[in-house]
Image (cartoon, rainbow, N blue to C red):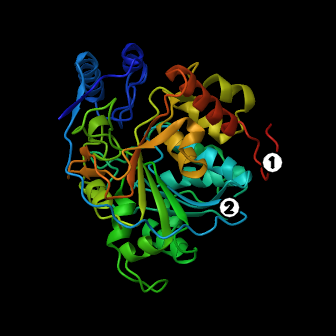
Amino acid sequence: MRARQLLPEAEVELEEAAAGGTEACGAEPSGPPPTHVHKGLLGVAVLFVALGLVELFASGVFELEAPVPPPIPPPSPAAPMGPRGVPLIIDTDMSFDVDDVGAICIAHALHDSGEANLLAVVHSTGYPEGIGAASVLNEWYGHQEVKLGAYKGEYGANSTGQWITGFYVPELVRRFPSRIKTSAEVPDAVEVYREVLASRDDHSVVIAVIGFATNMAALLRSPPDAGSSLTGAELVAKKVRQVVWQGGWYPPRHLNGHTTFNWDCGVCCGYTTVHGCAGDASYAVMHMPPNVEQVYTDLGDQVYHGGQGLRSCASTSNPCLQAYLLHPWGMNIRGRQSWDPLAVVAAVLGPHTIYSTKTGYGGVNSVDFNGANFWSAGNSTLQSFLSWQGTSPWYAERTQASNLLDRLLCARPTHAQPES
């Protein structure tokens, strides 16, 4: 057993806990909560702040040293990216928090610059209008060719059967032009996954999972279909190069054994019914083909995007800005924390561009049925988690990452109409 000392940013963590916490449980908006959000959210937020304080004043973080197994052969080399950049699929739960919007807008900007080839966006809850908001962003950026798919199960409703809508999705779908309004107008997410993967070069596709694991688990369980004679697991093994997960907690800043929003199906933050989602994060992570690299990130709670920077460069005719204006956590001076945007940028441009590095390469991320994860050291896998480089003062690294996100958000769409 080895003790790890807490980083020198501990004092700032106290401030951040009060300001927003981690995506294990998002910040509580000012004023009364909307009727669709569980009334216990405030109490849970207080509990997580208390737990954070316990962690901060602990003398260290302890990790068990796992036996080191023999190394496995490296994966097949990735196919060339091609002229359109990194082939990318985004799997989002866009509704509850607004950083999904920032992540997808940034992906469109990277598509415009040729650094990404955004192939598809799929939505991971049953909320019908969630994919409609993704379609709004496709339309705004002029990327109607980006395929859309949606989870069509019952997960995403509260205990009374009402969909958890969030603050901005209904308004985006109502106010902005979009060819798609609801999930009834798009294929099932697994169908889109399989169609897109079957058409791509071997070992080429990168998937950024910034929402729940419902679609990824269903893809891995899927049988052959008319588009491919391969099972879902075989198709992923053949076509996917890397999966970047926004999910889990990792040393040295976060203790093993805690659940986080994306992997506990939102239990931490107001989702009271998890049928159709429970256990999916465990299945997806633990059943990923071993030749597919998995990169996990919990970075973002001290990196902000949007805020006054986005307001200064965009008008209210821009749906990216409008989502942040509609969200009570999105448009303060600094903006919103950046869990999902950092995951997408790392997936496309690499961790170094957000001043982070892959840590613990070869280790094992074990995820239990309830979504709690446990990281074990090793050298037998293609798994790692992101941590800050530490080559500059920690505040400088986070500020530089924040500036990069804002530059991408402010990039003018190349195919969109001028902003009014």
Identify whether 285 is placed above or below 171: below
> In this orientation, does residue 330 appear?
no
Q: Residue 236: which disc?
A: none
Q: From the viewer's side, name the closer residue of 184 and 310.
A: 310
In the rendered view, does 235 fall on the left or right side of 319? left
Q: Looking at the image, which residue is at 53% across and 74% down?
A: 202
Q: From the viewer's side, name the closer residue of 221 and 114.
A: 114
Residue type of the residue flagged with mark 2: Gln
- Residue identified by numbered label 2: 144
Q: Secondary structure at mark 2?
A: loop
Classed neighbour count for the residue bearing mark 1: other residues with Cα under 10 Å, few (<14), some (14–19), many (≥20): few
List x then y, in percent, for residue 275.
24, 55
- Residue identified by numbered label 1: 417
- In terms of sequence position, does the residue under pointer 1 or pointer 2 come before the other? 2
Q: Quadrant of the C terminus?
A: top right
* Mark-to-mark CA distance, 1 and 2: 14 Å
Q: From the viewer's side, name the closer residue of 115 and 166.
A: 115
Q: From the viewer's side, name the closer residue of 236 and 350.
A: 350
